[in-house]
Amino acid sequence: MIDLAILGLLQDQDLHGYELKKRLGELPGAFAGVSFGSLYPALARLERAGAVREVEGHRAAPAPNVPMTGALSGEIAAFRARSHPGRERDDRVTGRRNRKVYGITASGRTRLETLLVGTTADDRTFALQVAFGRHLRPEQRVSVFERRRSDLAERLRTLLAQPAAAGRNDQYLQSLREHDARVLTNDLAWVDELVALARLELDDAGQPVPTSIGGIHP
Amino acid sequence: MIDLAILGLLQDQDLHGYELKKRLGELPGAFAGVSFGSLYPALARLERAGAVREVEGHRAAPAPNVPMTGALSGEIAAFRARSHPGRERDDRVTGRRNRKVYGITASGRTRLETLLVGTTADDRTFALQVAFGRHLRPEQRVSVFERRRSDLAERLRTLLAQPAAAGRNDQYLQSLREHDARVLTNDLAWVDELVALARLELDDAGQPVPTSIGGIHP
DNA sequence: GTCATCATGTAAGCCGTTACATGATTGC
DNA sequence: GCAATCATGTAACGGCTTACATGATGAC
């Protein structure tokens, strides 16, 4: 879970742990809660595994497709990063405790892809798979979304299959059950949207897709 | 979390671990996944803490308010339990490994109440609080639901406050964000229903409430 | 010079999982 | 008598949290 989040963020731009945590918190969902106590050990583990590597002249954020539309926190952070050129290394000679900027490696990219297409029934993991879905090829996206779809459908079937299962069916348990069914139905509709979106990109494969890839220069 | 689920189920009827696990799986939500490896240690811990106790002539399921409406698994299980009277103890004398039927104690009931009214931002815990909400007094229910309400409202505000926060805003991240907002809105509407329901019961306090407390005998 | 913030880590502990081990009961 | 299911537990481990420890930097 945390590996997927870290690698997904590093795929876009080199970052140090502290900044990484902030970015994690900006993602929707319940990733805000990730703490240093799990982040730093995770980074160390990923580094040992060769998925990330400490970098010096670190790669800033690539220029976004939409240029300068208001307050783009990505741009701001990239500026912050650029505004102290080489400081990391210089200070490491004398003082201690400076930022360690990490970048993703080739092996890390492979790992990221594995995680992004990986089978999982976990809701939070799927949210991450969507959040970083852009790093997949269209046909991979379709497959991930369709797997999720059948997963949700199965859950809904199971839920509906036990009709008022508990003898002690009071209003609250009943209400909870109905709510769960509604949630699953909503999620299904959403995943259907995602599948449709990914299918469109599949059809457009080869042609430039104006909204996401290329197409900035007319 | 698991303590709440166990105590909530034992409040209705005495059960042994194996059966407890099945009941857990029947609850809506993601409680199906609870494993023996956490259930049995949890039971042992609760027993050491005096919240549950092994019982002999164990209390079966109380008669449900709605009598015999179709296949009531609660009734079936109660029948199953009753169909081997006294077997637990008899067999324990000679053989080993027989069912240990647990019942809730007075201290366990106090603990259950604490957990049911407890502050928590955890979605799954809240689902349990709703599922066993009937064990609370109306005013406690109202307070739990309202706390949840303000919690969700806060989350929604936070989500909406960071509008397109990431410079790298692609369709998928965008879609995820919108979906999260929809989910929170739906949850809010649901909690509002729950609050309304609980408030009704508050107003009816003192009078018999036909659907849940008393009122079986006309 | 001191305080808030930035920044990196370690330690203890909780909560849960899977895999393993053991044995009893029931149906065929 | 043998397999499936019922039934209880232990061991090892994983992932995440809180609390703690340490130090640098910049604003005032």
Image (cartoon, coloured by chain):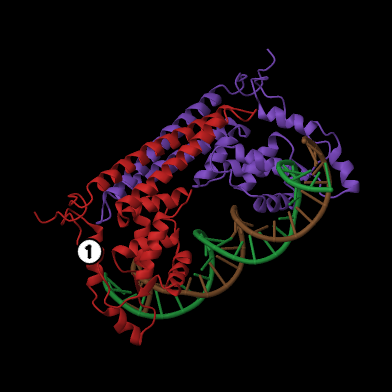
Chain colours: A red, B purple, C brown, D green
Quadrant hosting residue A51: bottom left
Q: Is residue B196 above or below residue D8?
A: above
Residue A33 appearing in the image: yes
- Residue nearer the viewer, A203 or B145: A203
Quadrant hosting residue C8: bottom left
Q: Quadrant of the N terminus of chain A?
A: bottom left
What residue appears at the point 56 percent right and 39 percent down from the top-left corner? B129
Q: Which residue does the numbered mark 1 point to in the structure image? A: A62
Residue A187 place in picture, x, y as percent: 40, 39
Going by the numbered disc 1, the residue's amino acid type is Pro
Q: Chain of mark 1?
A: A
Left or right of residue B95, residue A211 in this image? left
What residue appears at the point 47 percent right and 27 percent down from the top-left corner? B196
What residue appears at the point 51 percent right and 34 percent down from the top-left corner? A157
Left or right of residue A148, residue B132 in this image? right
Crowd class of label 1 (few under 14; some 14 to 19; many from 20; radius 10 Å): few
Residue B152 place in picture, x, y as percent: 42, 42
Left or right of residue B213, residue A190 in this image? left
Residue B213 place in picture, x, y as percent: 64, 23
